[in-house]
Image: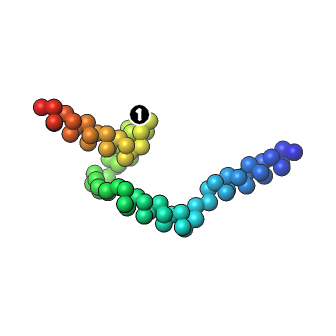
């Protein structure tokens, strides 16, 4: 019984992990239509520091950066 349960759990996990080329393409098309991209260049090693800082606050690196930009723009508008 335990082995059967583990096999079923594993099979379901693999199904959920499967991400077809069609799904990848659809996601890429949606992202291209819905979002603008901005490349940020930082000194070597700084990316990991930013990533860890954001994670320690429960944020993705992208969310942290976009919130920091929004906050800076808001503060500038209030001056």
Q: Is residue 27 visible?
A: yes
The percent coordinates of residue 4 (x first, y second) are 83, 49
- The answer to which image quadrant residue 76 occupies is top left
Judge left or right: residue 57 versus residue 18.
Answer: left
How many tags in the picture?
1
The residue located at (32%, 47%) in the rendering is 46
Quarter of the figure that contains the C terminus:
top left
Residue projecting furthest to the top: 79
Q: Residue at x 87, y 45 (%)?
A: 1
Q: Is residue 9 left or right of residue 44?
A: right
Q: From what the image shows, is residue 59 above or below residue 13?
A: above
* Drawn side of residue 39 relative to residue 11, left or right: left
Please indicate whether residue 63 sits to the left or right of residue 23 in the image. left
Quick one: SS at disc 1? loop
Nearest the viewer among 47 and 73 is 73
Q: Position of residue 49 (x, y in %)?
A: 36, 43
Residue that carries the numbered disc 1 in the rendered image: 57
Crowd rating for badge 1 (residues with CA inside 10 Å; few <14, some 14–19, many 20+): few
Q: Please say if 32 is above or below 2.
A: below
Nearer the observer, 53 or 32: 32
Q: Residue furthest right?
A: 1
Residue sitting at x 16%, y 36%: 77
Q: Is residue 63 above or below residue 57?
A: below
**Which residue is at the front of the view, 3 or 47?**
3
């Amino acid at each position: 019984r335990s082995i059967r349960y583990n096999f079923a759990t594993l099979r379901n996990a693999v199904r959920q992990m499967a991400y077809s080329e069609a799904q990848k393409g659809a996601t890429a098309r949606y992202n291209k239509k819905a979002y603008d991209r901005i490349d940020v260049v930082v000194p070597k090693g700084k990316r990991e520091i930013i990533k860890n800082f954001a994670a320690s606050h429960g944020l993705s690196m992208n969310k942290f950066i976009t919130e920091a930009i929004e906050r800076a723009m808001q503060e500038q508008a209030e001056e």
